Image (spheres, rainbow, N blue to C red):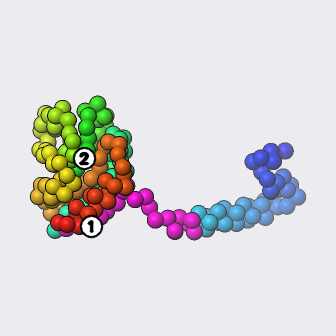
Amino acid sequence: MANNKSNNFKIFELEKNFNNTMVSSINDRLIEIRKKNIAQQLSGFQGCGHKLEKVTTINGIDFVDDASSDNSDATWFSLQRMNKPTVWITNLDSVNNMSDNLINAILEKVKFVILQGVYNSDVYNLFDELDIPSAKEGNMEDAVRQAFYAAEKGYSVLYSPCSTGPTEDRGRSFKVAVAQL
């Protein structure tokens, strides 16, 4: 006998009274109803702001807002999804915040790093040791401009802070700086 928690409609309990074709048809119809409901719900989904959000393309360079990536794992995930050589703008403030996976993704994907805001010299030195060109910029406008000059046609500029902070403000600041190019 079926458990009422897993079989509220007791459809399969009725199977012995109906032929298998009838039960199968009902089951298929229930699955189809669920699929339509899921499709309707997903069709209105706008996506998550500041998570791998393409801002624009300028001179063949894509600008991507990933301001919601505020830790090593989130930034690693984003770098893994980059399918072009990448100039990475980050607010990384400690080498202790970097996982081995993130370092491997940086070595594989990143062609230039821009440390934006207050930085730690250990972080800057790490990129030097990894033989990845890097620069320091105090504000977002200068960081975006530097990224634009460091990138080539076919590159992406990814803003993924890899540190905690106000996601909305940082993402908006990145978008405004890109618009000023």
Amino acid type of disc 1? Thr
The residue located at (21%, 42%) in the rendering is 118
Q: Residue at x 77, y 51 (%)?
A: 7
Furthest residue in direction right, as rendered: 17
User: Picture coordinates of residue 110 (x, y %)?
Assistant: 20, 47
Give how far across and how far down residue 61 sits, in percent: 19, 63
Question: In the image, 40: left or right of 97?
Answer: right
Q: Is residue 35 left or right of residue 85?
A: right
The residue at the point 20 percent across, 35 percent down is: 120
- Which residues make up the magenta segment? 39-58
| Residue 154 pos. (x, y %) | 18, 62
Q: Is residue 77 above or below residue 51?
A: above
Q: CA distance from mark 1 to mark 2?
A: 19 Å
Mark 1 or mark 2: name the one nearer the start of the chain: 1
Residue 41 on the magenta segment: yes
Indicate which label's residue lies in the foreground, 1 or 2.
2
Q: Residue drawn at (29%, 31%), measured in percent from left and top?
A: 96
Q: How far across and how far down the image is residue 33, in percent?
A: 66, 66
For the C terminus, the image quarter is bottom left
Question: Three-letter amino acid code at disc 2?
Answer: Thr
Find residue 56 and name its label. 1
- Label 1 CA crowd tier, 10 Å (few <14, some 14–19, many 20+): some
In the image, is 8 to the left or to the right of 58? Answer: right
Q: Say which residue label 2 marks.
A: 90
Q: Is residue 47 magenta?
A: yes
Q: Secondary structure at mark 1?
A: strand
